[in-house]
Amino acid sequence: MRTIVVSEFKAKCIAVLREAQRTGEPILITRRGRPLARVEPLAADATERRLGVYRGRMRVKGGVDLVHSGSEGDWEMLG
């Protein structure tokens, strides 16, 4: 794990973050020789959202209509 002092991190913040993302290794930030923070890249799957990823893998059983639930009578319009 690479270690840098907080003043260097402050001066090169974006470059340090990109390095952590590129290498996948955490970077320890210290102040006066004591650990202050650790920068770790997130896994690619944690930030990625994909629509339709479960298409064809799920099925609604029992013939339930998800669009028209039949609860229209339970609500009234305020005018």
Image (cartoon, rainbow, N blue to C red):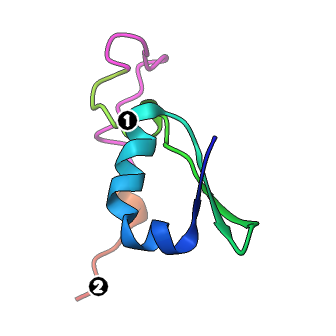
The label on residue 77 is none
> Element type at marker 2?
loop
Residue 9 shown in magenta:
no
Residue 4 placement, left or right of 37: left
Residue shown at the point (55%, 46%) measured from the top left: 40
Mark 1 neighbour density, 10 Å: few (under 14) some (14–19) many (20 or more): few
Looking at the picture, does residue 61 appear above or below residue 32? above
Query: Which residue is denoted by mark 1 in the rendering?
Result: 22
Q: Amino acid at mark 1?
A: Arg
Q: Position of residue 28 (x, y in %)?
A: 63, 54
Per the rendered image, the range of residues in magenta is: 54-71
Asked where in the image residue 76 lies, by quadrant, the reply is bottom left
Q: Residue at x 30, y 41 (%)?
A: 68
- The total of numbered circles placed on residues is 2
At a point 22% along the width and 89% down the height, the residue shown is 79
Three-letter residue code for mark 2: Leu
Instruction: Give me the disc on residue 78.
Output: 2
Say whether residue 73 is left or right of residue 79: right
Q: Position of residue 56 (x, y in %)?
A: 34, 10
Above or below, 21 relative to 64: below
Examine the rendered structure and indicate whether residue 43 appears above or below residue 61.
below
Helix, strand or loop for the magenta stretch, by majority: loop
Label 1 sits on a secondary structure element that is: helix
Q: Earlier in the sequence, mark 2 or mark 1?
A: 1
